C-alpha cells in the first residue's frame, strides 16, 4: 500500500529530505506532499543581502530549485499553504484552508523565526526582517524606490553585518545598533573588535551596548528614528539583524520534544518520534566538541540533515555526524571565519583553554595582494587538543577556517596541526601557512 | 667546551636549523658557522618567476633574511663560500679557499640541482636555469634589455609553467616544450589536460611528447631555436623548467647514505649520521601514505625539516612527521592544487583506487565571481580511505587542497570527509563546498 510522506516547509531541509526520499522510494510506494507557506521552494536566504545590495539579480537567482522541478520528480508541492495544527495521534496536519491532510510519515522543516526586540514601533512601515525572498523584494524595492538616506540595522549577527555592508554599498548611511558590546557575538572579543574596527573604517557607524528601546515613526506613519537608552538614530529604513531562533511552535504544540536551545530534539537519524523526522533550522544538533545540543541556523546543515532524514525515510540508514559551528562571512573587504568553540563556550563547557593569536599574510609578504590575516586558535591547556579557531583578514582569509574545522573534526592537537603538510606557493601563502605558524606558536606553550 | 656547528647551505633548510639551534644553545656552548656558495641567504626561490614577470620588485623582496640578521644572532655566515669536500672521519669540511673548517656537528642543506636535458647547446648564452637569485637577475635583465620576442620553456614542472605564465605576461610569445604528454606530471592525466587547455587558451603554445634534441645558436653565438625530433621552435631566450633533483653529491662522496630517490637518507629526526644532520631539497622524506622515501623539493618542507634538525642539534627532540606532496600553483587565472598520491603513484604502491571528479563553483553559482572548480578525489576501493586529491579551477580553488591534505593526514575516508562541517556563505562556496560534494559523490560508490 502506498504511504504518504508530508513535508512541512519547502526550503533546504524539507526539500532535501523529499528529494532523497524520492530517490530511494518509487511513487507507487511513497507519495510525497510538500507544503510551503511562502512563494518559493529551496531558496538561498543567505543570498538575500547580496540581492538587496545589487550584486545578485534577478531574485530568481536565489531559487535553487523551482516547485515544478520537484513536481517533475513526482513530489507534490503546495505553495502558499501553511500547516496550522499537527495531530500526531491521528497522523494528520491541518492546513490553513481548514482541510486535514493525512500522513503516514512526516518531515518537519519549518525553519527559523527572526528574533525581534520587544519594543514599540517594530511593525511600522520601513522596518524589515530578513528571512524570506518576500522580505528581500520588499527591502530592495524600498531601497530603489524610496532612496533612503539613512539605515539602521538592529543587531550584529551574520545577516546584520552583511545587510549593513550591502546597504552601504547602495550609498546609504548605515548605523548598526547593538545590545552587545560587539558585532558577531560568536567571535571572541579581540576578534570581534577587529571586525568592529573594519566596519567603522568602511564608514559604518557601530553603536554598541545600546539595546533598542523604540522605533519612532514620523507623520507619514513610516519609521523615522531608532531610540536606545542614550542615543537617537535617524532612519529612513530599519533592518533586523539579530539572528533567528528555531521555529518549532507547531511541532511543540503537538507534543514533540523541544530542547533548551529551542530546537526540536532529534536523534542522529533526524528522527523526533515514530515516523516523524525533522531537520534544519527548526531542530537542534549535537555539537561534536561538547556533545551537547545546539541550535545553529545554517543552510549547509539544513541541506545535510534533510538528506539524512530523507535517506532514513527512504529505508536507508544515515546518521548526521554533528556540527562544529563553522561559519564564514565577509563585510567590505574583511573576511571572517570561525569554527568550534569560542572562549565563552569553552568556559561554559568547563574546559580550560589557552589562546594563541598571530598575524600573518594571506600570500607571501612580497607578493602583490598579500593582506593581513589574523588567526586565533583555542586549545585545551592540558592536552593541547584544538577546541576552536577564528580568522579575520583580507581576501583569501576566511576559507582557511575549513582546514581548522577538519582538524577539529579529527580531534587534532595544535602540535599535530602544526605538522600537517599544507600547500605553499607565493601567490597563496607565506612559506608556512598562517594556520601552520599559529599552530606552531600554540604548540610551543 | 664550545662545540662548533657547521651549516652547509644558507637557504631555508640550513638557516632554519641554524636559527633554531641558536635559540636553544648559547654562543658560549655552540658556535655556528654557515657557509653559502651564493650571494644570498634564506631566499624564496619560489618567488623567482614573479620577479621575472615584474610582479615583485626589487629582488631583495625575495630575501627573507639577510646575512647580517643572522650575524646579529651570533650565527657566522660566510658568503660566496663553497664546501668542496667533506671529511667525516676528521670532522672537517674543505672550503673553496683550500682551508679546512673543523666541526663537531654538521648540518647539510645543499638543496637541489636543476634537471638539465643532455643535449647540445644548453650552455649557450640565452639559456637559463631558474634556481638562484642570480638566475633571476640574469633572466630579468635579459628580458628587459634584449626584449626577446619568443621564449621556449623546456619542461612543465611548477617552475616551468610559472615561468611560461610570467614570460607571457612580459609580452613574449611562449612555447612550452615537453618530453611528457602533459605539463605538471604530478597531476593525473585528466587534470593535467585541464591545465594544458588553460595554458593554450592563454596563448601559450604547448608542444607535448617532444623531447628536446638540441638548442641551436645563431651567428652571434646566442640561442636561436630549439629542436625536437619533429619540430623547430624559434627562441630568443630558453628557460629550463624540468624540475630539480637533490644535490647530495658532497655528502654522498663522504659516504653518507643516499636513497633511490637521489636524496640523502635521514631518520625522522633529520639525522644522517652521528652528529650529522640534513634537511630540505637535498634529502628524502617519508611519504605518509606509502611509508616510502620520496624526494620533493619544497621550501615549506625545507623550513620544517631544518627546524626539526635545529631542535635536535639544540638538544631537544623533534620529529619530522612526513610529507603528503601537497602543492599549489597558478598559471594565468587557473589555480592548481594537489596532495597525496596520484593515480600513477597509487598503482606503483600496489593499491586499488576509485576516482571521483566533480565540477562545481568556487562561490554560490549566482554570486559574482563564481568560477568553475574541478575537484578530483582518489580513494582506496575497499576501505574508502582517501589517497589523494587534485583541484583545478578559477580564483579561490587551489587553497581548498589544504582541507584535503588535513583529511589525508588524519587518514579519513571519503565518507567521513563528506560529513565534515565546512563553512558556507554565498561569497565563498555553494551550499555544500565542492570538497564536500565531491566526497559525498565518492562515498556513494
Image (cartoon, coloured by chain):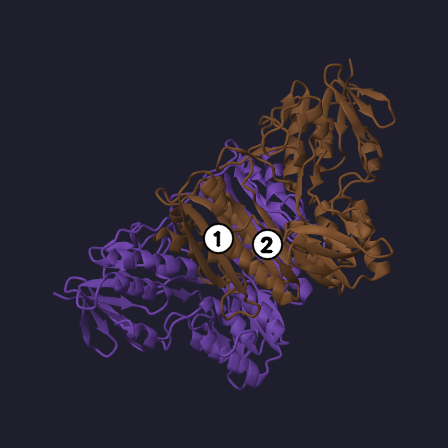
Chain colours: A brown, B purple
Q: Nearer the viewer, residue A197 or B439?
A: A197
- Residue lying furthest top: A1
User: Which quadrant is the N terminus of chain A positioned in?
Assistant: top right
The residue singled out by tag 1 in the image is: B326
Image position, residue B13 (x, y; %): 35, 63
In the displayed structure, does residue A425 sit left or right of residue A128? left
**Mark 2 secondary-structure assignment:** loop
The residue singled out by tag 2 in the image is: A209
- Residue lying furthest left: B1
In the displayed structure, does residue A136 sit left or right of residue B328? right
Q: Are marks 1 and 2 on the same chain?
A: no
How packed mark 1 is, by other alpha carbons closer than 10 Å (few <14, some 14-19, many 20 or more), is many
Q: How many marks?
A: 2
Q: Nearer the viewer, residue A396 or B170?
A: A396
Do we see residue B308 in this rendering? yes
Image position, residue B199 (x, y; %): 64, 63
Amino acid at each position: 500500500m502506498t504511504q504518504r510522506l508530508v513535508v512541512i516547509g519547502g526550503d533546504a531541509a524539507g526539500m532535501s529530505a523529499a528529494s532523497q526520499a524520492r530517490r530511494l522510494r518509487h511513487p507507487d510506494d511513497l507519495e510525497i506532499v510538500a507544503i510551503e507557506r511562502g512563494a518559493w521552494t529551496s531558496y538561498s536566504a543567505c543570498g538575500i543581502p547580496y540581492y538587496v545590495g545589487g550584486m545578485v539579480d534577478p531574485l530568481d537567482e536565489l531559487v535553487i530549485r523551482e516547485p515544478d522541478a520537484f513536481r517533475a520528480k513526482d513530489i507534490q508541492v503546495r505553495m502558499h499553504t501553511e500547516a496550522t495544527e499537527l495531530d500526531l495521534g491521528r497522523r494528520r496536519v491541518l492546513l490553513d484552508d481548514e482541510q486535514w491532510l493525512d500522513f503516514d510519515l512526516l518531515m518537519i522543516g519549518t525553519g527559523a523565526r527572526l528574533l525581534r526586540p520587544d519594543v514599540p514601533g517594530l511593525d511600522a512601515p520601513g522596518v524589515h526582517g530578513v528571512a524570506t525572498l518576500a522580505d528581500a523584494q520588499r527591502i530592495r524595492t524600498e531601497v530603489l524606490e524610496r532612496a533612503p538616506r539613512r539605515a539602521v540595522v538592529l543587531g550584529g549577527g551574520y545577516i546584520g553585518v552583511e545587510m549593513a555592508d550591502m546597504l552601504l554599498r547602495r550609498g546609504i548611511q548605515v548605523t548598526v545598533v547593538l545590545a552587545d558590546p560587539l558585532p558577531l557575538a560568536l567571535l571572541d572579543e579581540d576578534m570581534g573588535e577587529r571586525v568592529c574596527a573594519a566596519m567603522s573604517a568602511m564608514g559604518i557607524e557601530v553603536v554598541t551596548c545600546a539595546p533598542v528601546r523604540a522605533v519612532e515613526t514620523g507623520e507619514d506613519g513610516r519609521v523615522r528614528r531608532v531610540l536606545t537608552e542614550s542615543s537617537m538614530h535617524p532612519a529612513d529604513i530599519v533592518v533586523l539583524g539579530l539572528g533567528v531562533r528555531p521555529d518549532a511552535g507547531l511541532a511543540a504544540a503537538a507534543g514533540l520534544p523541544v530542547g533548551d536551545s529551542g530546537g526540536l530534539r532529534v536523534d542522529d537519524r533526524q528522527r523526533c518520534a515514530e515516523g516523524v523526522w525533522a531537520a534544519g533550522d527548526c531542530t537542534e544538533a549535537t555539537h561534536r566538541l561538547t556533545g551537547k545540543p545546539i541550535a545553529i541556523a545554517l543552510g549547509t546543515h539544513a541541506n545535510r540533515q534533510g538528506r539524512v532524514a530523507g535517506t532514513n525515510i527512504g529505508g536507508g540508514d544515515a546518521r548526521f555526524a554533528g556540527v562544529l559551528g563553522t561559519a564564514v562571512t565577509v563585510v567590505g573587504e574583511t573576511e571572517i571565519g570561525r569554527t568550534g568553540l569560542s572562549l565563552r563556550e569553552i568556559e561554559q563547557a568547563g574546559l580550560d583553554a589557552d589562546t594563541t593569536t598571530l598575524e600573518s599574510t594571506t600570500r607571501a609578504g612580497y607578493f602583490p595582494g598579500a593582506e593581513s590575516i589574523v588567526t586565533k586558535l583555542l586549545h585545551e591547556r592540558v592536552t593541547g587538543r584544538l577546541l576552536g579557531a577564528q580568522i579575520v583578514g583580507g581576501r583569501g582569509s576566511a576559507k582557511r577556517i575549513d582546514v581548522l574545522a577538519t582538524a577539529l573534526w579529527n580531534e587534532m592537537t595544535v602540535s599535530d596541526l602544526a605538522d600537517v603538510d599544507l600547500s605553499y606557493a607565493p601567490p597563496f601563502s607565506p612559506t608556512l601557512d598562517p594556520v601552520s605558524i599559529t599552530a606552531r606558536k600554540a604548540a610551543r606553550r
